């Protein structure tokens, strides 16, 4: 496999329930040798180039998170990963591991080439942060596949706005609460109170980046939706040496 000089495509793995169907289709094999960004707990289930996060409690739970059991403590597990790129927030730098790069984030503005200085656009979601990292890493040219970007929400007639609760029993992740228990399980308040097409709007203006939403049932409608079968036919055949890919990734995000 050649040293990477130009990355043709990237796969970003979120946590949506729609990923379930892809396991039986051989998704794992399709990811081998590709640029794969794993969001949050997806690192446990998929080979990836690097893991990304924006929540300090995901990386190193605060005392409140431990007491309230909002996040499992996976800090020792994270030490074993080859590369992590996360948002520098809420004092996480104090606990930064040697395998981790921390970047400034921006929840509102997409700064493109200036993101290293002004912060990478997050939209307050790890998947959006990952997409910002991917476009930057690919120099705003190529194809990006979004997996598990479902934006789960209930139908309007199912929501009691007078007694609103953003917590439901819906299975919104591809893994169960029994397997990984965290505060996001069944929590859809953010999705029900934000328009996804507004959150992803900055990326629509990218002329040389094609973004596919690999979930036909997704509530994100600003990108072309395709099936996993279609994605497999579109994926570039080129694969990358992951060690070299990580070296180049580190260089781009640290400027050294």
Image (cartoon, rainbow, N blue to C red):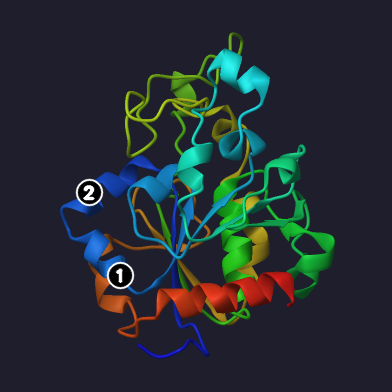
Residue 201, above or below 247: above
Spot the residue most to the left: 24
- Location of mark 2 (residue): 21
Q: Residue furthest top?
A: 163
Drawn side of residue 189 relative to residue 38, left or right: right
Residue 151 seen: no
Foreground of the two, 32 or 170: 32
Question: What number is the disc on residue 234?
Answer: none
Residue 70 position within the rendered picture, expressed as x and y whole percent measured from the top left: 55, 22
**Which residue is located at x 51 percent, y 88 percent?**
6
The quadrant holding residue 138 is bottom right
Classify the position of the N terminus by image quarter. Answer: bottom left
Q: Dot 1 corresponds to which residue?
A: 32
Residue 72: image x %, image y %?
A: 49, 28
Say what secondary structure mark 1 lies in. loop
Residue 61: give x, y in percent of width and height: 61, 29
Dot 1, how many residues are within 10 Å of its Cα: few (below 14), some (14-19), or many (20+)? some
Specify whether residue 77 is in view: yes
> Sequence order check: which comes first, mark 1 or mark 2?
2
Q: Nearer the viewer, residue 12 or 228?
A: 12
């Amino acid at each position: 496999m050649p040293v990477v000089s130009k990355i043709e495509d990237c796969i970003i793995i979120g946590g949506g329930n729609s990923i379930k169907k892809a396991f039986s289709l051989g998704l794992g094999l399709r990811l081998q040798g590709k640029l794969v960004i794993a969001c949050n707990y997806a690192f446990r289930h998929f080979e990836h180039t690097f893991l990304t996060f924006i929540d300090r409690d995901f990386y190193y739970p605060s005392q409140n998170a431990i007491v309230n059991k909002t996040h499992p403590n996976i800090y020792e597990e994270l030490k074993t990963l080859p590369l992590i790129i996360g948002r520098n927030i809420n004092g996480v730098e104090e606990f930064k591991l040697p395998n981790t790069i921390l970047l400034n984030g921006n929840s509102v503005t997409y700064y493109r080439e200036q993101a290293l200085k002004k912060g990478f656009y997050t939209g307050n979601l790890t998947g959006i942060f990952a997409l910002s990292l991917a476009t930057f890493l690919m120099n705003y040219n190529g194809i990006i596949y979004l997996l598990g970007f479902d934006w789960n929400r209930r139908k309007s007639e199912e929501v009691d706005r007078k007694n609103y609760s953003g917590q439901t029993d819906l299975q919104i992740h591809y893994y169960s609460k029994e397997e990984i228990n965290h505060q996001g399980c069944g929590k859809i308040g953010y999705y029900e109170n934000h328009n996804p097409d507004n959150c992803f709007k900055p990326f629509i203006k990218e002329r040389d980046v094609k973004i596919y939403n690999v979930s036909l049932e997704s509530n994100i409608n600003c990108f072309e939706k395709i099936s996993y079968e279609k994605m497999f036919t579109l994926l570039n055949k080129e694969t990358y040496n992951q060690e070299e890919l990580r070296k180049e990734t580190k260089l781009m995000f640290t400027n050294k």
